[in-house]
Amino acid sequence: MSKSTKGNYTCSDHKQTNSSIDNTQTPKKVETKIDELIKSVEFMGKQFDSFNSKVDSLINEVKKLKIENEKMKNENNYLLKEISIINFKIDIIEQSRLIKSIEVAGIPHTPNENCAEIVKEIGLKTNTVINVVEANRQFFNNNSNSIIIAKLETIDMKKTLIRNSKITKISANNICSAWPDKYKIFINERLTKERRSLFGKARAYAKEKNFKFVWVNNGDILMRKDENSKIQRIKNQQDLDKA
């Protein structure tokens, strides 16, 4: 049959479908879409490569920072050790200047007092021959507490006075009858600020760990668990932690 005749025997839906298909345009559209997809994939690939490059760069920077940080950490630890050594040497020098000095606690503060004469009187009461080079009062805690600091002529005088004061226990009333008997006199070696603080920690540690003996000898802080234990010298907090 002719084309016109065939058209008479074709359903309307089929006619519409066939007429709506553009066989000449469809391959071009598909090809265009494929090209766009390829370009999009290539663009994303370049973006991904750029992202990877930036990530690699950041990772390298982080590695460099870690190395620098570790280097600075090591240098800092070295400097801290050096400072600790320097401070320890300074403390030794300062303590050597106090080798002949004592601290006297338990003497009430009075106006126009003569601290040197008070220390001499303590020597007499403890049967100790001493020569006082200088003496003065040092105040703490807004003048509420104070001690007398005295420098004696020799180290032996210092040691003897400290030893005799522990044997012949005296109170302020023994020095001056006007002073109350409740004030007990204690004589100790004079320590630097650092050693005084460490000595306080050592006494607290000894009480906690049941050490029987904690004392100072020529500026050295010493500890002993009991009569049969080895004497330990405490130079710093690390020594105390190992005691």
Image (cartoon, helix red, strand yellow):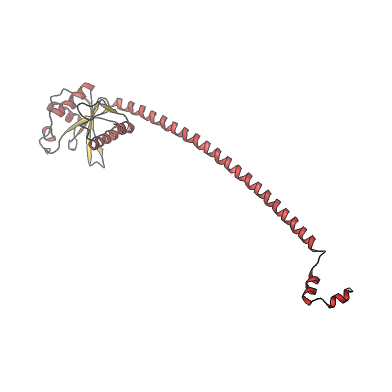
**Viewer-side residue, 3 vs 185:** 3
Q: Residue placed at 29% from the left, 35% from the top?
A: 197
Q: Position of residue 138 (x, y in %)?
A: 25, 35
Q: Position of residue 231 (x, y in %)?
A: 25, 26
Specify whether 56 is left or right of 196. right
Q: Residue furthest front?
A: 1
**Residue 10 sits in which quadrant?**
bottom right
Where does the N terminus fall, quadrant-wise?
Answer: bottom right
Q: Residue placed at 81% from the left, 64% from the top?
A: 25
Q: Determine if residue 131 is in view.
A: no
Q: Determine if residue 202 is in view.
A: yes
**Residue 201 sits in which quadrant?**
top left
**Residue 223 sits in which quadrant?**
top left
Where does the C terminus fall, quadrant-wise?
Answer: top left
Q: Is residue 92 above or below residue 66?
A: above
Q: Residue furthest left?
A: 177
Specify whether 187 is left or right of 11. left
Q: Position of residue 137 (x, y in %)?
A: 23, 34
Q: How many marks?
A: 0
**Viewer-side residue, 113 vs 154:** 154
Q: Residue placed at 72% from the left, 56% from the top?
A: 37
**Viewer-side residue, 242 vs 90:** 242
Q: Is residue 146 above or below residue 43?
A: above
Q: Residue furthest bottom?
A: 8
Q: Residue furthest right?
A: 2
Q: Is residue 28 above or below residue 88?
A: below
